[in-house]
Image (tube, rainbow, N blue to C red):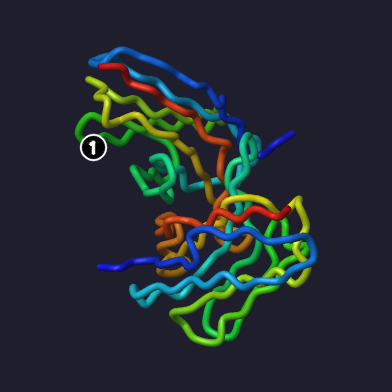
Amino acid sequence: NAGVTQTPKFRVLKTGQSMTLLCAQDMNHEYMYWYRQDPGMGLRLIHYSVGEGTTAKGEVPDGYNVSRLKKQNFLLGLESAAPSQTSVYFCASSSGQSGNEKLFFGSGTQLSVL
Amino acid sequence: QKEVEQDPGPLSVPEGAIVSLNCTYSNSAFQYFMWYRQYSRKGPELLMYTYSSGNKEDGRFTAQVDKSSKYISLFIRDSQPSDSATYLCAMMAITGGFKTIFGAGTRLFVKA
Protein backbone atom coordinates (compact mmCIF):
# COMPACT_ATOMS: atom_id res chain seq x y z
CA ASN A 1 0.00 0.00 0.00
CA ALA A 2 1.51 3.32 -1.08
CA GLY A 3 -0.77 5.51 1.08
CA VAL A 4 0.38 9.11 0.67
CA THR A 5 3.32 9.75 -1.66
CA GLN A 6 5.20 13.05 -1.88
CA THR A 7 7.66 14.14 -4.52
CA PRO A 8 10.37 15.33 -4.43
CA LYS A 9 11.92 14.30 -1.10
CA PHE A 10 14.58 17.02 -1.12
CA ARG A 11 14.99 20.27 -3.00
CA VAL A 12 17.25 23.29 -2.84
CA LEU A 13 16.01 26.54 -4.40
CA LYS A 14 17.45 29.98 -4.83
CA THR A 15 15.44 32.98 -3.66
CA GLY A 16 12.85 33.90 -6.27
CA GLN A 17 12.69 30.50 -7.95
CA SER A 18 9.43 28.61 -8.24
CA MET A 19 8.56 24.99 -7.71
CA THR A 20 5.66 22.59 -7.25
CA LEU A 21 5.37 19.84 -4.67
CA LEU A 22 3.22 16.90 -5.63
CA CYS A 23 1.13 14.78 -3.28
CA ALA A 24 -0.73 11.66 -4.34
CA GLN A 25 -2.97 9.38 -2.25
CA ASP A 26 -4.46 6.04 -3.19
CA MET A 27 -6.97 5.70 -0.33
CA ASN A 28 -9.84 7.54 -2.07
CA HIS A 29 -9.76 10.19 0.66
CA GLU A 30 -11.88 13.31 0.29
CA TYR A 31 -9.76 15.69 2.37
CA MET A 32 -6.14 16.58 1.68
CA TYR A 33 -3.80 18.96 3.48
CA TRP A 34 -0.43 20.64 3.22
CA TYR A 35 1.48 21.32 6.44
CA ARG A 36 4.88 22.78 7.14
CA GLN A 37 6.97 21.70 10.11
CA ASP A 38 9.53 24.00 11.71
CA PRO A 39 11.56 23.46 14.91
CA GLY A 40 9.57 24.53 17.96
CA MET A 41 6.50 25.37 15.87
CA GLY A 42 4.95 21.99 15.28
CA LEU A 43 2.87 21.32 12.20
CA ARG A 44 1.11 24.34 10.74
CA LEU A 45 -1.60 24.07 8.13
CA ILE A 46 -0.88 25.89 4.87
CA HIS A 47 -3.85 24.99 2.66
CA TYR A 48 -6.36 22.19 2.53
CA SER A 49 -9.01 20.72 0.25
CA VAL A 50 -12.33 19.12 1.14
CA GLY A 51 -12.81 17.55 -2.27
CA GLU A 52 -11.84 17.60 -5.92
CA GLY A 53 -11.82 21.12 -7.29
CA THR A 54 -11.89 22.81 -3.86
CA THR A 55 -9.17 24.55 -1.87
CA ALA A 56 -9.12 26.66 1.29
CA LYS A 57 -6.57 28.63 3.29
CA GLY A 58 -5.10 27.32 6.48
CA GLU A 59 -3.08 29.03 9.18
CA VAL A 60 -0.06 30.11 7.09
CA PRO A 61 -1.14 30.40 3.42
CA ASP A 62 0.88 33.43 2.28
CA GLY A 63 3.39 32.71 -0.48
CA TYR A 64 1.79 29.39 -1.43
CA ASN A 65 -0.86 28.28 -3.90
CA VAL A 66 -2.56 24.92 -4.28
CA SER A 67 -4.65 23.01 -6.75
CA ARG A 68 -6.78 19.86 -6.55
CA LEU A 69 -7.72 19.01 -10.12
CA LYS A 70 -7.99 15.29 -9.38
CA LYS A 71 -9.25 13.68 -6.19
CA GLN A 72 -6.05 11.73 -5.65
CA ASN A 73 -3.62 14.64 -6.19
CA PHE A 74 -2.93 17.85 -4.26
CA LEU A 75 -0.27 20.23 -5.55
CA LEU A 76 1.53 22.91 -3.53
CA GLY A 77 3.19 25.72 -5.45
CA LEU A 78 5.75 28.31 -4.44
CA GLU A 79 5.72 31.10 -7.01
CA SER A 80 8.71 33.06 -5.69
CA ALA A 81 10.57 31.19 -2.99
CA ALA A 82 11.90 33.03 0.07
CA PRO A 83 14.36 31.87 2.76
CA SER A 84 11.45 31.93 5.27
CA GLN A 85 9.94 29.04 3.32
CA THR A 86 12.82 26.75 4.24
CA SER A 87 11.01 23.96 6.03
CA VAL A 88 9.86 20.37 5.90
CA TYR A 89 6.56 20.05 4.05
CA PHE A 90 4.09 17.28 4.75
CA CYS A 91 1.04 16.28 2.80
CA ALA A 92 -1.77 14.45 4.58
CA SER A 93 -5.17 13.03 3.74
CA SER A 94 -8.27 11.96 5.64
CA SER A 95 -11.48 10.23 4.74
CA GLY A 96 -13.84 13.12 5.49
CA GLN A 97 -15.62 14.97 8.26
CA SER A 98 -16.37 11.89 10.34
CA GLY A 99 -12.87 10.55 9.91
CA ASN A 100 -10.73 13.64 10.12
CA GLU A 101 -9.32 12.61 13.47
CA LYS A 102 -7.17 10.17 11.48
CA LEU A 103 -4.68 11.91 9.25
CA PHE A 104 -2.41 9.89 7.00
CA PHE A 105 0.89 11.61 6.23
CA GLY A 106 3.45 11.35 3.49
CA SER A 107 7.15 11.10 4.27
CA GLY A 108 7.82 14.79 3.72
CA THR A 109 9.77 17.12 1.43
CA GLN A 110 12.79 18.93 2.86
CA LEU A 111 13.06 22.30 1.14
CA SER A 112 15.93 24.73 1.52
CA VAL A 113 15.72 28.22 0.03
CA LEU A 114 19.07 29.98 -0.23
CA GLN B 1 -0.68 32.16 23.40
CA LYS B 2 -0.73 28.99 21.31
CA GLU B 3 -3.94 26.97 21.22
CA VAL B 4 -1.98 23.83 22.10
CA GLU B 5 1.08 23.85 24.36
CA GLN B 6 3.53 20.95 24.51
CA ASP B 7 6.92 20.77 26.19
CA PRO B 8 9.46 20.09 23.41
CA GLY B 9 11.84 18.16 25.68
CA PRO B 10 14.02 16.33 24.95
CA LEU B 11 12.99 13.69 27.43
CA SER B 12 15.53 10.93 28.11
CA VAL B 13 14.55 7.78 30.06
CA PRO B 14 16.06 4.33 30.65
CA GLU B 15 14.57 1.30 28.98
CA GLY B 16 11.61 -0.05 30.95
CA ALA B 17 10.62 3.31 32.44
CA ILE B 18 7.10 4.71 32.41
CA VAL B 19 6.92 7.79 30.23
CA SER B 20 4.41 10.59 30.66
CA LEU B 21 3.85 13.07 27.84
CA ASN B 22 1.47 15.99 28.25
CA CYS B 23 -0.28 18.81 26.45
CA THR B 24 -2.49 21.67 27.54
CA TYR B 25 -4.94 23.55 25.37
CA SER B 26 -7.09 26.64 25.50
CA ASN B 27 -9.95 25.96 23.07
CA SER B 28 -12.87 24.34 24.91
CA ALA B 29 -14.42 23.37 21.55
CA PHE B 30 -11.86 20.61 20.96
CA GLN B 31 -13.60 17.22 20.98
CA TYR B 32 -11.07 14.87 19.37
CA PHE B 33 -7.67 14.35 20.95
CA MET B 34 -4.92 12.50 19.11
CA TRP B 35 -1.34 11.43 19.59
CA TYR B 36 0.96 11.05 16.61
CA ARG B 37 4.39 9.46 16.64
CA GLN B 38 7.07 10.74 14.29
CA TYR B 39 10.36 8.96 13.71
CA SER B 40 13.32 10.93 12.43
CA ARG B 41 12.96 11.96 8.78
CA LYS B 42 9.50 10.35 8.55
CA GLY B 43 5.94 11.61 8.48
CA PRO B 44 3.78 11.50 11.62
CA GLU B 45 1.65 8.41 12.13
CA LEU B 46 -1.47 8.21 14.26
CA LEU B 47 -0.83 6.39 17.52
CA MET B 48 -4.08 6.89 19.41
CA TYR B 49 -7.17 9.05 19.41
CA THR B 50 -9.84 9.76 21.98
CA TYR B 51 -13.22 11.37 21.62
CA SER B 52 -14.15 13.72 24.48
CA SER B 53 -12.98 12.88 28.00
CA GLY B 54 -11.74 9.66 29.51
CA ASN B 55 -9.03 7.08 29.09
CA LYS B 56 -8.10 4.79 26.22
CA GLU B 57 -5.61 1.95 26.39
CA ASP B 58 -3.80 0.19 23.56
CA GLY B 59 -1.10 -2.23 24.59
CA ARG B 60 1.64 -0.29 26.37
CA PHE B 61 0.03 3.06 25.55
CA THR B 62 -2.66 4.88 27.53
CA ALA B 63 -4.21 8.19 26.50
CA GLN B 64 -6.01 10.35 29.05
CA VAL B 65 -8.16 13.43 28.47
CA ASP B 66 -9.26 15.80 31.23
CA LYS B 67 -11.48 18.37 29.55
CA SER B 68 -12.20 20.20 32.80
CA SER B 69 -8.49 21.00 33.12
CA LYS B 70 -7.87 21.21 29.35
CA TYR B 71 -5.06 18.68 29.78
CA ILE B 72 -4.21 15.50 27.90
CA SER B 73 -1.59 12.86 28.58
CA LEU B 74 0.02 9.88 26.89
CA PHE B 75 1.59 7.21 29.08
CA ILE B 76 4.03 4.64 27.72
CA ARG B 77 4.66 1.62 29.94
CA ASP B 78 7.79 -0.54 29.73
CA SER B 79 9.37 1.91 27.30
CA GLN B 80 11.62 0.47 24.59
CA PRO B 81 14.44 1.99 22.52
CA SER B 82 12.08 1.64 19.53
CA ASP B 83 9.79 4.18 21.25
CA SER B 84 12.43 6.86 20.67
CA ALA B 85 10.65 9.40 18.49
CA THR B 86 8.88 12.74 18.59
CA TYR B 87 5.34 12.57 19.97
CA LEU B 88 2.87 15.16 18.73
CA CYS B 89 -0.41 15.85 20.46
CA ALA B 90 -3.20 17.05 18.21
CA MET B 91 -6.75 18.25 18.67
CA MET B 92 -9.77 18.89 16.54
CA ALA B 93 -13.09 20.63 17.00
CA ILE B 94 -16.23 19.46 15.23
CA THR B 95 -16.98 23.07 14.32
CA GLY B 96 -14.52 25.19 12.38
CA GLY B 97 -13.94 22.91 9.44
CA PHE B 98 -12.60 19.83 11.22
CA LYS B 99 -9.09 21.22 11.16
CA THR B 100 -6.45 19.55 13.31
CA ILE B 101 -4.23 21.69 15.53
CA PHE B 102 -0.88 20.21 16.55
CA GLY B 103 1.39 20.73 19.51
CA ALA B 104 5.08 21.37 18.87
CA GLY B 105 6.01 17.77 19.73
CA THR B 106 8.12 16.21 22.50
CA ARG B 107 11.33 14.39 21.58
CA LEU B 108 11.70 11.16 23.54
CA PHE B 109 14.89 9.12 23.88
CA VAL B 110 14.74 5.67 25.47
CA LYS B 111 18.21 4.42 26.42
CA ALA B 112 18.99 0.71 26.27
Where does the image place residue A31, in percent across and percent down from the top left?
49, 71
What residue would you read off at disc 1?
A: B58
Where residue A48 sits in the image (x, y, percent)? 60, 68
In this view of the protein, which residue sits in the foreground, A74 or A30?
A74
Asked if B36 appears above or below B108 in the picture, the reply is below
Name which residue lies at 72% across and 56% down: A60
Nearer the observer, B35 or A112: A112
Label 1 amino acid?
A: Asp
Left or right of A57? Residue A103 is left
Q: Residues within 10 Å of mark 1 (few under 14, many from 20)?
A: few
Left or right of A73 in this view: A113? right
Locate residue B76 relative to residue B43 in the image: left or right: left
Say if A85 sits above or below B40 in the image.
Answer: below
Task: Locate the N terminus of chain A by quadrant.
Answer: bottom left
User: What residue appears at the point 70 percent right and 55 percent down from the top-left corner?
Assistant: A113
Q: Residue B2: x, y in percent?
A: 69, 37
Looking at the rendered structure, the secondary structure element under dot 1 is strand
